[in-house]
């Protein structure tokens, strides 16, 4: 009996092992549920900032639905790149890919007030940035030294801090002047919906364990959605007109070279690649009790970049490995990549059905805002956790202080860069990129303290 149990345990740690379908299908669906809310949120935010959403002066609801579709479809496609792989592409590990929050500080100013023209430049930048990201797979092991916890922790913390404003705006009724001009913006009704999401999420997180705890944000969104429906705030007008099946369209939003966006996407690709290295290592340590091999790390980076490039080709947003699913692998102890492949197929199927995207698009801004406040707060908390490994001497405190102040300051006061050209202003006005570059450079050139 002992040998049998030991053998079963060993099989679960084997990425090539396929559990019986009765176990594999629910395990795969569990991976989808754990990442679903985080995956679609960036697409909804960018669509809202670009002016596509309900109530916008030039509302384009099919475009919003399409972006939600692409978030699901190419999360599934990129996950297949990781789990099945081909050639050097793919870690062939249970890595789940999804739309990245990290790029939002760069993407939001790229499309704010620019409509479809901004989306053309953004998705072209995603395509080119993805190809650059792919190339990082050849050198990823050599550049890790430049990104210690001081730098990566600062970057992750800033991502969360710079995006908190978006969460508050959504909870109040939506971002953009066209939403803020509505009489109900900032009203009690909006904050009631957002508050339900926050309270239910926290209750589930701290009173349950396992999958329910990991899916607490999704369950909180569902609770908030029910309350919003009871309050009459859910609009189903776009669902009936949405198609049952549709294929992605190449260059859906056009093709436009904007060097500020392209450079920003390429610089952020370095951050995303390092995040994927950490997730790959986390999966092999948590699920198999070993270090990730060089080929697994390179393969994961190749798949990360290729998945982003393909998404950009069809009007999608950048994707990266999802850390919450790393925790799920450690929790279940199931290392089977085929389980995650099943989850990827769920995502692809949902991404090919616009009615699914149309239903998701009925989520009111305040409901999404409640979830976003938690998600962005958790991003910032993850950065703080990473910074706990830093030795806080005078050198490191100075690097952190200068980089953080400059990053947050430039994002809050972009007019301070009037002397710069539009490309430089776009890059530095994100706040994240100047802070990241400054932290990396200072960490490389300032001598370590000996005392």
Image: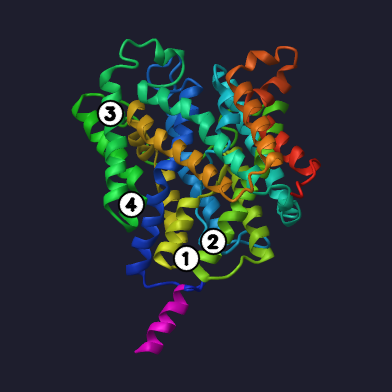
Where is residue 79 drawn, in percent x and y?
52, 54
Residue at 25%, 38% in the rendered image: 223
As drawn, is 72 to the left or to the right of 365? right
Where is residue 38 drawn, in percent x and y?
44, 42
Q: CA distance from mark 2 to mark 1?
A: 7 Å
Where is residue 345 drawn, in percent x and y?
44, 55
As drawn, is 85 to the left or to the right of 140? left
Q: CA distance from mark 3 to mark 2?
A: 38 Å
**Residue underneath mark 2:** 83
Q: Quadrant of residue 424?
A: top right
Among the two numbered marks 4 and 2 on one chain, the one whose residue lies closer to the N terminus: 2
Pick whichever, 24 or 186, lies toward us.
186
**Residue underneath mark 3:** 193
Please, what secondary structure does the residue beneath circle 3 have?
A: helix
Q: Contact, CB < 8 Å: mark 2 with mark 1?
A: yes
Q: Is 451 part of what is drawn in magenta?
A: no
As drawn, is 217 to the left or to the right of 58? left
Q: Is residue 99 above or below residue 192?
A: below
Q: Is 5 part of what is drawn in magenta?
A: yes
Among the two numbered marks 3 and 4 on one chain, the one whose residue lies closer to the N terminus: 3
Main secondary structure type of the part rendered in magenta: helix
Tell me the magenta residue range.
1-12
Please, what secondary structure does the residue beneath circle 4 have?
A: helix
**Residue underneath mark 4:** 213
Q: Is residue 336 above or below residue 274?
A: below
Q: Quadrant of the N terminus?
A: bottom left
Q: Residue furthest front?
A: 451
**Residue underneath mark 1:** 338
């Amino acid at each position: 009996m002992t040998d049998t149990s030991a053998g079963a345990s060993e099989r679960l740690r084997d990425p090539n092992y396929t559990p019986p379908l009765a176990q594999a299908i629910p395990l795969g669906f569990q991976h989808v549920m754990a990442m679903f809310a985080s995956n679609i949120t960036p697409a909804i935010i960018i669509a809202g900032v670009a002016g596509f959403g309900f109530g916008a002066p030039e509302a384009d609801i099919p475009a919003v639905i399409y972006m939600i579709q692409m978030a699901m479809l190419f999360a599934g496609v990129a996950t297949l790149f990781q789990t099945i792989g081909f050639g050097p592409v793919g870690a062939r590990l249970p890595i789940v890919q999804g739309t990245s929050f990290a790029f939002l500080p760069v993407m939001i100013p790229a499309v704010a007030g620019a409509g479809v023209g901004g989306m053309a430049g953004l998705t072209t930048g995603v395509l080119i940035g993805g190809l650059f990201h792919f190339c990082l797979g050849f050198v990823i092991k050599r550049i890790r030294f430049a990104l210690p916890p001081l730098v990566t922790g600062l970057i992750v913390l800033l991502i969360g801090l710079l995006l908190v404003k978006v969460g508050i705006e959504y909870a109040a009724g939506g971002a953009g002047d066209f939403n803020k001009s509505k009489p109900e913006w900032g009203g009690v009704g909006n904050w009631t919906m957002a508050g339900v999401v926050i309270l239910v999420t926290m209750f589930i997180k701290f009173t349950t364990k396992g999958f329910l705890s990991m899916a607490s944000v999704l369950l909180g969104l569902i609770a908030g959605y029910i309350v919003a429906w009871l309050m009459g705030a859910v609009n189903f007008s776009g669902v009936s007109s949405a198609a049952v099946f549709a294929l992605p369209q190449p260059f859906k939003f056009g093709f436009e070279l904007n060097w500020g966006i392209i450079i920003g996407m390429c610089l952020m690709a370095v951050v995303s690649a390092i995040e994927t290295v950490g997730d790959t290592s986390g999966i092999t340590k948590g699920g198999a009790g070993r270090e990730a091999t060089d080929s697994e790390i390179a393969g994961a980076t190749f798949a990360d970049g290729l998945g982003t490039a393909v998404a950009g080709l069809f009007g999608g947003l950048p994707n990266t490995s999802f850390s919450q699913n790393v925790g799920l692998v450690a929790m279940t102890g199931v290392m089977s990549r085929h389980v995650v492949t099943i989850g990827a197929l769920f995502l692809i199927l949902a991404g090919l059905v616009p009615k699914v995207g149309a239903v998701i698009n009925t989520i009111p801004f305040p409901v999404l805002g409640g979830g976003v406040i938690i998600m962005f707060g958790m991003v910032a908390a993850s950065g703080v956790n990473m910074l706990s490994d830093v030795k806080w001497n005078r050198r490191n405190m100075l690097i952190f202080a200068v980089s953080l102040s400059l990053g947050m300051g430039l994002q809050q006061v972009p007019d301070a860069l009037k002397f710069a050209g539009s490309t430089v202003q776009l890059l530095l006005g994100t706040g994240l990129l100047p802070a990241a570059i400054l932290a990396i450079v200072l960490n490389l050139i300032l001598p370590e303290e000996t005392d």
